[in-house]
Amino acid sequence: MQTQRVNTLALFLLLLLSPPRPAASMPPRDPLRSSCAKARYPTLCFQTLSNFSNLATKPLDLAQAAIKVSLARTRTLSVYFKTLNATSSRFGKRQRVAVSDCVEQISDSVTQLINTLNELQHLRAGTFQWQMSNAQTWTSAALTNGDTCLSGFNDGGATADGAKIKLEVKRRITDVAMLTSNALYLINRLGDDSVSGKPRTDFGN
């Protein structure tokens, strides 16, 4: 019996004095995927931003990258409408007006996204909340411009060519709207992560 007690005590001391076992290694966190997880279009968010091979994973960098993606696609859309406007004689009157309006609206969107990017690249502690409000307002306006442009094609009286154009316009505007919506989410996320109105260039996820 005494021998059993000695063995039990020895085992206890051995366990007590043994170095702790290393914890199981956790898989590294994917900051980009976690940042995009709650975006309106998470898969698109991850796919488009992962193309930035040298992209840092700080939220401010992600928001800027998302605006750059949206801006590039909006510029392409602007060129599309300008080209369409130059050949709009084959459309009905209402669609000619709609195309002309879209030229102006999407051009405004380009300007608004440029302003947004500029604001995000020059955040300052003393004006952080004001700058964030500007960025959110301009990005939201760019989204609204796309909706307004598309609504102009909802009137009747379209020609056969006009009907095809309407489908193409909807596809292109929806594509841009999805990117811009994700960008707005990442911008809003910056505001949610802010502290005392001061910009943080080292935001965590």
Image (spheres, rainbow, N blue to C red):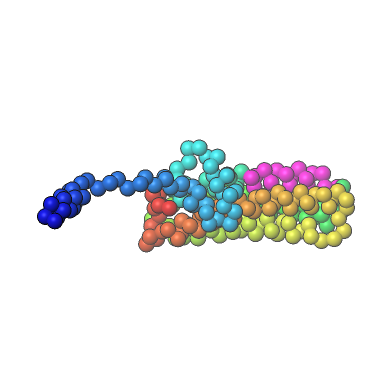
Q: Where on the picture, by quarter, is residue 149?
A: bottom right
The reply to whether residue 141 is in sight is yes
Q: Quadrant of the N terminus?
A: bottom left
- As for residue 87 lying within the magenta part, the answer is yes
Q: Is residue 71 above or below residue 1?
A: above
Measuring 69% from the left and 58% from the top, which residue is drawn there? 147
Q: Is residue 74 left or right of residue 17?
A: right
Which residue extends farthest front?
1
- Between 110 and 171, the residue placed more toward the observer is 171
Number of numbered labels in the structure image: 0
Q: Position of residue 62 (x, y in %)?
A: 49, 48
Measuring 28% from the left and 46% from the top, which residue is drawn there? 21
Q: Is residue 136 left or right of residue 205?
A: right
- As for residue 129 lying within the magenta part, the answer is no
Which residue extends farthest left?
2
Q: Is residue 99 above or below residue 133?
A: above
Q: Is residue 112 left or right of residue 12?
A: right
- Between 141 and 45, the residue placed more toward the observer is 45
The reply to whether residue 115 is in sight is no
Q: Position of residue 4 (x, y in %)?
A: 16, 53
Range drawn in magenta: 73-89
Q: Position of residue 181 (x, y in %)?
A: 59, 55
Which residue extends farthest top?
53
Measuring 73% from the left and 44% from the top, which residue is drawn there? 80
Q: Position of residue 28 (x, y in %)?
A: 42, 45
Magenta span main SS: helix
Measuring 57% from the left and 44% from the top, which residue is drawn there? 47
